[in-house]
Amino acid sequence: MEDNTGLIRELVIANRILAREGVVDAFGHISVRNPNNPESYFISVSRAPELITVDDIVEFRLDGEPIGDLRGRTPYGERAIHGGIYEIRSDVNSVVHNHSQEVVPFAATNTLIRPLLHMSAPMGAHVPIWDIRDNFGETNHLVVTMEQGRDLATTLGENASALMKRHGCVCARRNIREVVMTAVYLQATAKMIMQAKLLGGEIDYLTPAEVDLCNVNQLGPLGLDRAWEYWVMRSSYKD
Ligand SMILES: [Zn+2]
């Protein structure tokens, strides 16, 4: 068995960062694919991200079945979001799901969130909107079956983020730090679009080519290392 101690520690830190930055609250979660077994991923048992410690992290197969003993603890009900995306996106190694109150109004009104700031680039040029009703009718809106997770993953497609109607959003990227950057700035972008709309006039968004150019920095050491150090300092995580 390979040693995943460092990766699991980073996953715990990411949970604390997402909580501190207001991207998750009592709900929402982040996972990371097991680099030594791409058919499984690590995620916490069902707890608020701010409270998560190394001991809470467990491993699941992509179909949502636990690997090892959960010791009576409850897994996240919506882990199918993570498995569904890992199944079809071999390039994705970390996934965030949240119910950001800044993001939810966009899906509710079928309004696309598009990048209007260079720092918005990690969310991608296009953020599709998924509606669980389309293929599953009236539900409680939780993504609890693999069929639902796969359906969401299909709408996400090759994009880095997708909105979930009446629910929240999902971000999928190559690693933990990238997906945290993506989730933090997806929420910030939603806030900024709302403010720009108050000012009136047409919003001038980044072009897809500009998104790619900006991501060289935002998802490279210049942006990512600097942001990560800052976020860790602000978070409740202590060595
Ligand atoms: Zn949810």
Image: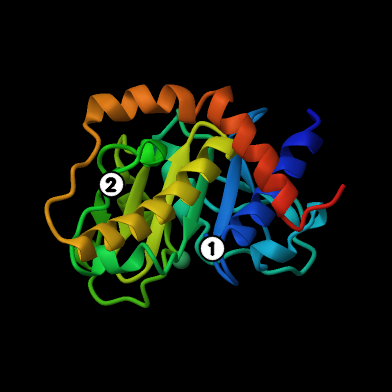
Question: Residue 224: image x %, image y %?
Answer: 57, 32
Along the polypeptide, which appears first: circle 2 or circle 1?
A: 1
At 59% across and 55% down in the image, what residue appears?
A: 18
Q: Quadrant of the N terminus?
A: top right
Quadrant in which residue 47 is drawn: bottom right
Label 2: few (<14), some (14–19) or many (≥20) C-alpha neighbours in 10 Å? many
Whether residue 16 is situated above or below residue 77 in the rendered picture: above
Residue 157 location in percent, x, y? Answer: 29, 39
User: Residue 236 versus residue 157: which sits nearer the camera?
Assistant: 236
Amino acid at the residue labelled 1: Gly
**Residue assigned mark 2:** 127
Disc 2 versus disc 1: distance between alpha carbons? Answer: 19 Å
98 over 208 or under it: above or below: below
| Residue lying at the far right of the rendered structure | 239
Left or right of 200? Residue 182 is right
Residue 59 seen in this snapshot: yes
Which residue occupies the foreground of this view, 199 or 145? 199
* Residue at 55% in and 53% down: 64
| Disc 1, SS | loop
Q: Any mark on residue 28, and which?
A: 1
Percent coordinates x, y for residue 79 in the rendering: 53, 57
Compare residues 229 and 143 and report the one nearer the observer: 229
Residue 136: % across, % down:
26, 67
Amino acid on which disc 2 is placed: Val
Residue at 45% across, 28% down: 91
Q: Residue at x 59, y 64 (%)?
A: 76
Specify whether tag 1 is near ligand 1 (CB below 8 Å): yes
